[in-house]
Image: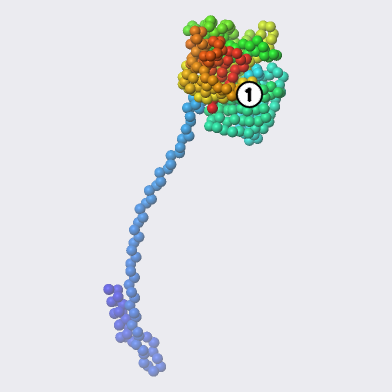
Amino acid sequence: MKNALSVIALGAMLSACGGGGGGDNGTSNPTQPVAPTNPTTPTTPTTPTNPTTPTTPTTPTTPTTDAVTTASQAVAVQAGLTVIAGANANETVYDVAADIGDTWRVTFDSAAKTFTVKLISTQFSLTDRGGSYTTTTTGNLTTYTGTGLQLTVDARTRLLSGNLTMGGKASTVSGTGYAVGDVAKLAGTYTFLGAMRNAANGGSLFTPRGALKLNADGSAQLCSNGAFSAQGVCTAVASMGEFDSATLTLVKDAARGVLVARQGQQDFGIVHVHAGDHGLALFIDRYGRNQENILRVGTLVAAKTSTLSATLDGSYACADQGGATGTIAIAGATATLTNLSNGRSHTENVTLNKMGVGRQAVDFDGVAVLKDPADAQSDYSMFMPVSSSMAVEYSTDKSYLTVCLKK
């Protein structure tokens, strides 16, 4: 009230002193007192806002890499393998062994959706070709489909397999997206299966199986129907059949960008190296002339020797000679085989880490025997995985290896 009272007192003083303007009659009107001003209500100070708690930054999610990819990449690094380079970033390249006895280079252009097949080695005077393709992807497997072409790639291991026709010749192929850097890093013992024949007429079937030993200096020994002793000596196994041994040398062919196996002064074949998640695998395009100067062709597949286990279980789609043949479903000690030509199915017994059957069976890591008890003793097949997505089947009565893709 102090402010209000001071204003009233000031107004009374001004009235008593006659303040204001005079008129002609000498009289003056008294000044009206000034109405007191209502005091201003003081502003309530704003309560300070609590500072905002800073948001904790989100930790980026680390992409997960599956076990197959991790294992395959580790094998590739240890073996000094490098990805085969394309002409640009859109191209992916694979070198494959064709079961007719050729080596081809398949290139996919993801931007143009085109493929090319280049002949690195051919025994049948074939020529390069190309075309367009479409793709379908299921899980880690991408299938490329074009005219005379149906090939599947496992993105985890850079493995390619499928059917491809060149110059009217249909072939089943298998190969890799890797090139060899240092031959010494391929050293080790491999289990192998093979099928060979005369190029001219398909006659004189030869189905070798056994062990392959690669040395750090590039020398190698193919021990057919035999095994290496603890001392590293190639030794015949009587129950496996006709014994044979071949001495090879692996050399890099810089001009063609491939690894060549030579036997003496002539080529034995071209070796494609795959970084399987189970270990290294070799796809060998076999060609060369025998002592009678007859051209022999075929394929051999070798896998770093390891003990098989339940990882063999699964369903496989199989093909050879450029066409689908059937399916094999393995569950423990039983395999169910379905023949696509007649739709019939039957079961066979599965024995791991053996070669041969019955009393002739011998311990041999890396392969499984598939046997129908109703068939003759000599009629059976062997099954060897080269990675988590592919295996090869060897039959005693077939002149071609069968390539089986795990579904």
Q: Can you tell which quarter of the image residue 302 is in?
A: top right
Q: Is residue 383 left or right of residue 11?
A: right
Q: Can residue 50 be seen by looking at this rendering?
A: yes
SS of the residue under disc 1 = strand
Q: Is residue 325 left or right of residue 358?
A: right
Q: Is residue 375 above or below residue 73?
A: above
Q: Is residue 8 above or below residue 46?
A: below
Q: Can residue 191 be seen by looking at this rendering?
A: no
Q: How many marks?
A: 1
> Where the C terminus falls, by quadrant?
top right
Q: Is residue 282 left or right of residue 42?
A: right
Nearest the viewer among 348 and 144 is 348
Which residue is drawn at the image coordinates 36% and 92% (left, top)? 27
The residue to which callout 1 is attached is 323
Which residue is drawn at the image coordinates 57% and 16% (left, top)? 394
Q: Check the image and tell me how it is coloured.
A: rainbow
Q: Position of residue 28 (x, y in %)?
A: 36, 90
Which residue is drawn at the image coordinates 55% and 32% (left, top)? 138
> Where the N terminus falls, by quadrant?
bottom left
Q: Position of residue 90 (x, y in %)?
A: 62, 33
Which residue is drawn at the image coordinates 67% and 24% (left, top)? 165
